[in-house]
Image (cartoon, rainbow, N blue to C red):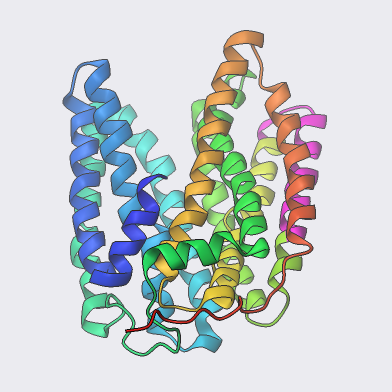
Amino acid sequence: GIAQPFAGAFADRLGSVRVVVTGAVIYAAGVLLMAFGGSLETLNLGGGVLMGLGIATTSFSVIMPAFGRLVPAEKRSWAFGMATSASSAGQLVFAPLGQQFINMFGWQMALVALAAFLALIIPMVLPFARAGAGDKPKIDTDPALPLTTVIARAFGHPSYLLLLAGFFVCGFHVAFITVHLPPYLTDLGLSKTIASWSIGLIGLFNIIGAYSSGLYGGRYSKRYGLSFIYLARGLVILGFISLPVTATTALTFSALMGLLWLSTVPLTMGLVTVMFGTRNMAMLYGFVFLNHQLGSFLGIWLGGRFYDQYGNYDMIWHAGIVLSVIAALLHWPIKETAAEPATAPAQ
């Protein structure tokens, strides 16, 4: 999360392709180090620091601007939905496939296979360079401003701050469920296969949800769409924890949550672009995703902490519902208009 604004700033100035290629190498190296490190320190360095840097430099805050620059403004929300859907397709494939690799070859070789797949990012991203989408914007009506001015302008804009706070909740939900839903289900007697497919099913239905969100954002109010998504998440969680946990309820929860999973991303990124334009959008996305990752950290850590202390996840599930309502309220007053224009410094 900390690295994402920096990765975005480099992408704005050097182009997305260079950043993504570098990130793919770092990401794969982190996975290999986690597989063969053999100590707590190397686990944290590989699975924590290097993989964290790899995710920051290959994920949404860098990829979204490349998509946004590839298409005209009226198709930008649709492009964001496509990018998010592609990410979900990966989740659909690799959650159950990763479990099968572990069953067949052991966890270390499963990580080696993952590192090999990550290396494929490099040839896959090269078409962006040929299309010009990986470059910094060549035509932009926004003035070139110092980074300090850009950051001060963003953090002085109330709607941007509300967006940051709301996306914190998204990270809390997504990371907690990704990490803790499988053990939650197995603790309650379901098989590891059902647990892994529950995560894969979220990815499958998020393809539908994210793409639909991108289409919606191109036509209707993004802030109202976000309020609805967060409120719906709370209702889905409430229904899930109120019913007996069976394979049917687990997979139904995954399907419904998948529709709402990263459908927040196209709308959130669309709002940032509406507010501040395209010149510095990767860096400003990066700050939004930093807040997302802070929420992710808290969701994962608190989930483990409360489970260790109380032997269940009840308090975190209820916290997720409360945060859903708060996020829905935070997005309602956001203004879907451009921020006050800033002027370039005198030469």
- Decide: is 86 above or below 249: below
Residue 303, image x, y percentages: 59, 24
The quarter of the picture where the N terminus appears is top left
Residue 159's image quarter?
A: bottom right
| Drawn side of residue 151 relative to residue 172, left or right | left
What range is drawn magenta here? 227-247
Determine if residue 263 is in view.
no
Work out whether residue 36 or residue 49 is closer to the camera in this orientation and state it. 49
Residue 316, image x, y percentages: 68, 27
Work out whether residue 26 or residue 141 is closer to the camera in this orientation and state it. 141
| Drawn side of residue 322 relative to residue 79, left or right | right
Work out whether residue 334 or residue 293 is closer to the camera in this orientation and state it. 334
Residue 162, image x, y percentages: 67, 56
- Decide: is 338 above or below 211: below
Residue 19, image x, y percentages: 24, 61
Residue, x 60% and y 46% (percent of image)? 168
